[in-house]
Image (tube, rainbow, N blue to C red):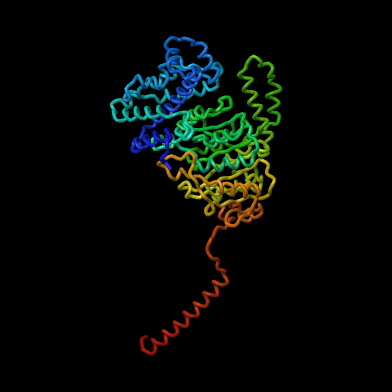
Amino acid sequence: MFKSKSHNRVILHKLMRKGRRKNIPLNMRYYVLYAFLYKYMSDKLKNHLLYHLNGDEADFNIFYLTDEGTDDLRQWALNDIGYFFTTKSAFIDEFIANKYVDDIFNPDFFKNLKNSIEFSQDNPSKKYFEKIIEILDDKLNFSSIYGDDDLNSFMSNYLFSISKFDIEEREFTFAQVYDAIAYSRQIRLSSTPDYISQLINSIVKSQRRDVSNAYDPFLRNASILFDLHDQFTMSDIYAKENNELNYFYSLIKAFINEINFDNLHILQENAIKSMSYDSQLFDVIASKVPDSFDEFSKSTLKSQSIEVPTDNDFKEKLFNNLGMDKLSDDEEALKALKILEKRFNAVEKNEVASFSGEYESLKDSEFLFLINMINSLKDDGLMVISLSQNFLFKSSLTLLRKFLTHENHYIDGIISLPEELGGVVRPEVVIVLRKNKNSGDVVFIDLSKEYGTEISRNAFPGLVKRNLVLDKKTISNILDALNNRKSVDKFSQVVSLKQIEENDFNLAVSRYVDTYDGEFIRLKDLKSEKEKIDEKMDSLNERIDALLDDLNFR
């Protein structure tokens, strides 16, 4: 399948082969990802300028050489794409043309863009661009590789290859190339497997006609959230990502995928410490939850607890007696008070504001954030997440599972994913939760037997397992069973909450969906067979004893 005429795929193959045994230092990985941003912004602007100049390269050169028509062309670029290069040397092909290939990996390559770019006034992308540059400046340390001629040469050739990709190719897009490089052995970005993004987004699309906003508190490589953005016309998308490399990667991905930065809200923040996003309520929360939270301290976990003001008059004293009108000239104070008021309102609407009685211990649960995520949904909100199967049967989480099923009826469906699909050590499940659920049951779906796969559209050489996604038929079967609440032999089972309670709130899919293919033997028949064997054994022992007596062998 890889014998393609795609220009981008050919370059990608060569790049993968060259770097197969090369381990790029962590700070160098930021430079590689940045090179994609530089290439994209440079070629996008140049293509737009050439279009305006009717494709005449000579006019383009004259324009920058003589400044003829500079104001008109500059204003056109600022209005149309939001930025402009003040010098011709800022374009990536111009920079490389003026350098020998082995010398392009130097500080000028990374300073060239930031020193020559001009953004239109109030362009929201400027804030994210400056954040990218800020992170890169922090990582910029060429002195650490001086004297390493091998690494210097490798990086120069790597950047040169990136400059040769076609940002307008449709067969294997520039965005797909960017993802492929990020997942490669050189960058090693932690990402959400394609089959998980595919399943989560298919469920959301099947259950929601419209999504005005969505939230992913564990963004990783942004595949879930950005795919949702492509499917729905959203006014806002929200995310948090604690890992700096993933955060850096996602900002650049937003540029390459032409996300509207007016609608984008990404924080580099640990979601476990603060699951909410400025008390926003969401139509959809979709995410791949981390497998482990060992890195978080007990104090961090306790900070998740939902605190309710003990003094009923506290809000009145704060807002009414303080007199917000007296602070009319202090914008920062007003803004802070408005946010605080919004959070109080969110708490008041929250049905699960505190835990008492048998649920008191949930305040210290490592999975308390699941409840906080649900409480961040709108009344008709939908949450679809992927997490470790341990959640379904771990004894320490029994009370939490009871709270999510018996107490609040939040869980709508559970889908176990086949280990073979991703080759993962810890099998995962996708869980569908609703803020206000109508049915009194849970749909369990087992994909250990009945599933098919196909090659992902993001497929690239070197990672065969991660090239696989669920095929259309399997996705259709999952959605049919989940949305129409169907029990299908060896595939799905609709289970009442009473039956779940009888199983001590164990949610292991294998407990409810029988996928056994062998013959069943009744215990009664097995007992009868054993009795016959025992009789034969007794008879045989008697004959042996008789023979021994005849032989006088005692």
Compare residues 25 and 75 and report the one nearer the observer. Answer: 75
450 lies above or below 16: below
- For image coordinates 58% across by 71% down, the residue present is 524
Most foreground residue, 234 or 474:
474
Q: How many marks?
A: 0
Q: Is residue 416 above or below residue 156?
A: below
Q: Quick check: 442 above or below 213?
A: below
Q: Quadrant of the N terminus?
A: top left
Q: Residue at x 58, y 27 (%)?
A: 263
Q: Residue 232 appears at what percent x and percent y?
A: 61, 34
Residue 110 image offset from top left, x and y in percent: 40, 22
Which quarter of the figure has residue 319?
top right
Q: Is residue 368 visible?
A: no
Provide residue 94's location: percent of width, then percent of height: 39, 19
Point out residue 69 in the picture as x, y percentages from the top left corner: 49, 10
Q: Is residue 124 visible?
A: yes
Quadrant location, the C terminus: bottom left
Q: As drawn, is 503 to the left or to the right of 196?
A: right
**Residue in the image at 70% along x and 21% along y:** 321
Q: Quadrant of residue 357?
A: top right
Return the residue nearer the eye: 350 or 483: 483
Question: Relative to residue 544, is residue 522 drawn left or right?
Answer: right
Residue occupying image coordinates x 36% and y 32%: 25
User: Residue 257 versus residue 224: which sits nearer the camera?
Assistant: 257
